[in-house]
Structure formats: C-alpha cells, structure tokens
Amino acid sequence: MPFSEATLDFMALNRVMNSREWFHAHREEYLKLVVEPTAGLVEALAPAMWEIDPSLIIIPKVGKSISRIWRDTRRGPELPIYRDVMWITLLRAKYENYPSFWFEYSPRCLRWGCGWYQTDPAVMECARELILSHDADWLAALSAFEGQDVFELEDERYKRSRHPDAPENERAWLDEKSFCLTHEETELGILYSEELPERLVRDFKRIVPVYDFFLKALSMSRLREHIR
C-alpha cells in the first residue's frame, strides 16, 4: 500500500489523542497506513542503496530501519507519548556512531539527507584535520557538495570561528559542531508519488563523496582510539 493523505491524517490524530488505549484500538490502521508504506519505501530503496554502500543494514521493520511512532517516556515523561513524525535510517550499524542516509515525513514537511544527528567530537576533529590538509577525499566531498543544489549543510556552527583565515567554503565546514546535509520540502505531493524512491536515490547519489568523507573521518578517529 502506498503513502496517502490518510497516512498523515492518522499520524496527526494519533498525536492529538496521545493515548495508548486509542493507539492499540487503532493498531491495524497504524500498520496499514503507516508501517506498510514505510516498509515498502525501505524495500524499494534497498537495491540502489546497497550499490552506494554494500555494508548498509536495511531491514524494513519498526525498530530496525524504521522508527517507532512512540517515544521512550523514560527520557522525558512530560513529553507526548506519540510523535507525528516517522523516519527511516539507513546505516551500517546502530549505536556505533555511523553516518546515515535518512528520510523523514510528517504532516508538516518531508526531509531527507546524510550525516549524523550528533557527530562525535573526536570524529569532527579528524574531519577538520582532513579539511585543513586538503585530503583527496575531502576535496571530492567539497566538489560534490558544491556541485549540487539539493542539500544544505545544517547550521550548527560555533558563533566564533576557530579558523578565521580559512577560505569561506572550508570555514563553513570547519566551524560546524556536527555534520548533516539536509533537504526539506513543504510540498507533500512527492510522498504519494511512485517516483519517491527514485528521487531519494538520485539525491543520495549526488552526495556519495560526502558520505565517503564522513566514513573516512570516523575510521580515522577509531584508529586513534585503538592506538591509545
């Protein structure tokens, strides 16, 4: 079953109801309207994403490549139980600090991109060293990023530049606290289109050199940790 307006309507209503009893009474709708089309998208993306990185773990199940719609209330009992946002995450392994490709949808917007929710400081330090040394993988990443107009680098920069003498295009990266490339659309029509998987793959392929640069910085930080 494809995504439909009913998908977002259910997510919005479930968020408003914010009731475990209501959710369980409407669990079949959740599975049909939300989980089924999200799993279908994961399955459609898998072949092309494995061409990008054969090590990606892609499992079309909730708690695997698909997010849960409920929160862990132990981390914030004052927060609503249910979200009106769902996402898929494609990465090599959970809980090991890998960068990911991701897609997120809600009644407000669609978002997709590549990177980390929060990059480990040790990885950021290695990435800065690669940038300052003009490493070949960094130059390829920069060329790919500047050669596309889909993704933006999320603005999580230090207020005061630590590298004021660096070229502006490098300084934008050097001053980041975390790395994530993001595209956002408020026009939701693409969610209901059969072209969605093709669009995501096409956009992700534009930034494969950036993903490779992220992996190199992570590998560099792990090697240093191992040596210590």
Image: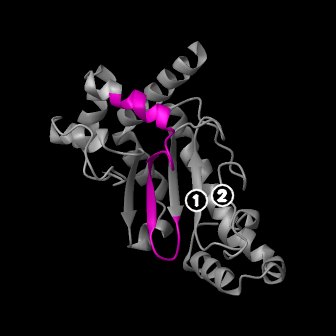
Q: Is residue 127 magenta?
A: yes
Q: Position of residue 188 (x, y in %)?
A: 43, 72
Asked if the residues shown at circle 1 and circle 2 are in contact, with their CB atoms under 8 angstroms apart, the answer is yes
The answer to whether 182 is drawn above or below residue 27 in the figure is above
Between residues 134 and 212, which one lies in front from this camera angle?
134
Task: Count all numbered tags in the image, as a single digit.
Answer: 2
Tell me where the magenta segment starts and ends, as one range: 105-128
What amino acid type is highlighted by mark number 2?
Ser
The residue at the point 44 percent across, 25 percent down is 216
Residue 52 seen:
no
Q: Residues within 10 Å of mark 2 (few under 14, many from 20)?
A: some
In the image, taking residue 89 as reference, residue 168 lies left or right, namely left
Where does the image place residue 145, in percent across and percent down from the top left? 28, 41
Q: Secondary structure at mark 1?
A: strand
**Element type at mark 2:** loop
Structural distance between the alpha carbons of marks 1 and 2: 5 Å
User: Picture coordinates of residue 76 (x, y %)?
Assistant: 69, 68
Which residue, given by chain and number where applicable, does mark 2 sit on?
67
Label 1 sits on residue:
87
Find out whether residue 115 is within the magenta segment.
yes
Residue 35 at least partly seen: yes
Residue 121 position (above or below residue 180): above
Quadrant where the C terminus sits is top right
Between 194 and 150, which is closer to the camera in this rendering? 150
Residue 17: give its label: none
* Amino acid type for the residue under numbered disc 1: Trp
In the rendered image, the quadrant that contains the N terminus is bottom right
Residue at 34% from the left image edge and 31% from the top image edge: 128
Q: Residue at image x 52%, y 18%?
A: 224
Residue 35 image position (x, y, % from top left): 69, 64
